[in-house]
Amino acid sequence: MIVDHLSNLYKYTFLNSNISKAIDFIKNNDLLSLPQGKTIIDGDEIFILRDTYPSKIESECFFESHLKYLDIQIVLKGSEYIGYSNKDNQGIIVTESYNENKDITKYQIKDFTKVHLYEDMFAIVFPDDLHMPKLRKEENTTVEKAVFKIKLQENKE
């Protein structure tokens, strides 16, 4: 997982060619004005999931991972913790097997790292990064978020 300020997102374009498309979209659009739900940028290659929610206590959240897409999770307003654990860490329990239609596996993890995300920060989350978004940092916090879903390129060996 990579965590940084939104102004530095351009430094990570080498990770996936579609990150440049995401940056162009960010520069030319007000992410806060996007409708809630899915906004397609380039077919199934890149889209945004826009959400507004109250941050939650740990027992109301879950760990997840994805195989087809990497996430760029951008906090637009508010702040939250995002839980992090690598898939190879000890004590990971799969609670829901991989759902190909939703590109998600769900987990339960006791020992993990919490990373504080606040306005204009992002986290790039890869398939090996088990992550728990929406974790409450402070009570009564509403979070405005845009999650760019960037299709992973297949290895051509």
Image (cartoon, helix red, strand yellow):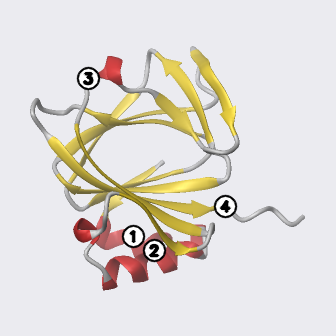
- Choose the circle earlier in sequence order: 4 or 3: 3
- Choose the circle earlier in sequence order: 2 or 3: 2
Q: Which residue is mark 1?
A: 9
Asked if residue 136 is positioned above or below residue 145 in the image, the reply reads above
- Choose the circle earlier in sequence order: 2 or 4: 2
Whether the residues at callouts 1 and 2 have beta carbons within 8 Å, the answer is yes
Whether the residues at callouts 1 and 3 have beta carbons within 8 Å, the answer is no
For label 3, count other residues whose C-alpha is less than 10 Å away and answer few (under 14), some (14-19) or many (20+): few
Which residue type does callout 3 highlight?
Ile
In this rendering, the label closer to the viewer, 1 or 3: 3
Check the image and name the residue furthest to the right. Answer: 157
For label 1, count other residues whose C-alpha is less than 10 Å away and answer few (under 14), some (14-19) or many (20+): some
Q: Which residue is mark 4?
A: 152
Q: Residue at x 25, y 29 (%)?
A: 56
The x, y position of residue 76, in whole percent, is: 23, 59
Q: Residue at x 23, y 70 (%)?
A: 33
Image-based side of 138 in relation to 88, left or right: left
- Choose the circle earlier in sequence order: 1 or 3: 1
Q: Which residue is mark 3?
A: 57
The x, y position of residue 24, in whole percent, is: 41, 83
